[in-house]
Amino acid sequence: MLKRSIIIILTVGLIIAGQSVVGAAKSACPDKDKACSELSKLADAEQFDKIIEKAEGRKTYSDAAKAIIGQAYLMMAGKESNTPEQEEQFCLKALEYGATSAYMGLYFIHAGLDKEKALGFLQQYIMTRPKDSVPYVLLGEAEMEKENYEDANLFLREAKTVARGHSANLDWMLFQVNYLLRDFTYASAMLDGALSHGQFVNELKTLAADPRYADISRRPEFRKYEPMIKGTSARAAI
């Protein structure tokens, strides 16, 4: 699971508008930056271990070169042969070179062992203002579990702001949080989004049995969902 999570992070984090961050750094290498050009060639050949060897032997690099080195450490962190300790060290080194998505790797490394420590890495990540909805969603889920709905709402709304596309899952969470915060107009809009592709119909029926949502079909903002709730219930009874 950990390896898969890091690979997902790398795939999402390194691909921006069809171009890898390493590729973007390559094109940004100054004309006379020989060190950056050498690192770019190694990145093209996916020789990330050689990039790291060069980085350890030199202390001064341009920002473009540092970007390549940081991503090389991230790629090394995803190797199947790593121990958790090695993965963590690679992620920490990536941070030294400005690869802030390494905070996500650190989160997954620690999530199963120390949840609060893991969430601390997400807090550090969002301080960098990433254009990545995942850390905000994870923090929002954590606050929902603690019933800290105000904080959950802040994180989840920020996730929606930076998300690159529509997410029914995110809309579903925002619906729940805002219903509990009594912002029914926004909650209704989010429920529309969650149900837009036929998802969460059964979940809505189950949620309607929760005492906290007992009046959902009686509120004007949600009355249109009453047939859906009753229809789902009827189908479940067959």
Image (cartoon, helix red, strand yellow):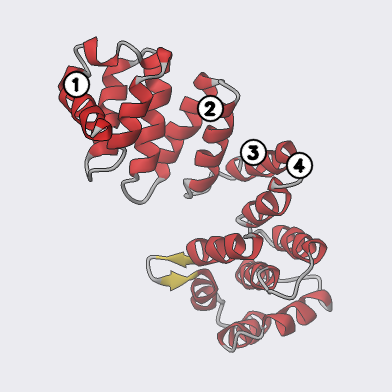
Q: Secondary structure at mark 2?
A: helix
Residue 226 circle label: 1
The answer to whether any part of residue 181 appears in the image is no
Residue 165 at what x, y percent from top left? Answer: 32, 50
- Could you tell which of marks 4 and 1 lies nearer the N-terminus? 4
Front position in the image: 233 or 184: 233
* Cα gap from disc 3 to disc 4, whole angstroms: 15 Å
Circle nearer the viewer, 2 or 1 = 1
Q: Earlier in the sequence, mark 4 or mark 2?
A: 4
Indicate which disc, 2 or 3, sits on the residue closer to the N terminus: 3
Q: Is residue 118 left or right of residue 191?
A: right
Sort mark 3 into few (<14), some (14-19) or many (20+) by Cα contacts within 10 Å.
some
Foreground tag (4 vs 1) = 1
Residue that appears at 71% across and 39% down: 115
Left of 15 or right of it: where is 207? left
Disc 4 to disc 1, C-alpha distance: 42 Å
Residue lying at 52% horizontally and 73% vertically, measured from the top left: 28
Image mark for residue 114: 4
SS for callout 3: helix
Q: Nearer the viewer, mark 2 or mark 3?
A: 2
Q: Residue at x 55, y 44 (%)?
A: 135
On the rendered image, what quadrant is the C terminus found in? top left
* Mark earlier in primary sequence (3, 4): 4
Q: Amino acid at mark 1?
A: Glu
Compared to 201, does 108 lie above or below?
below
The percent position of residue 184, horizontal first and vertical second, equals: 30, 16
Q: Residue at point 54% right, 24% down?
A: 151
Cα separation, mark 2 vs mark 3, equals 16 Å
**Side of 86 relative to 231 (left or right):** right
> SS of the residue at dot 4?
loop
Circle on res. 123: 3
Q: Secondary structure at mark 1?
A: helix
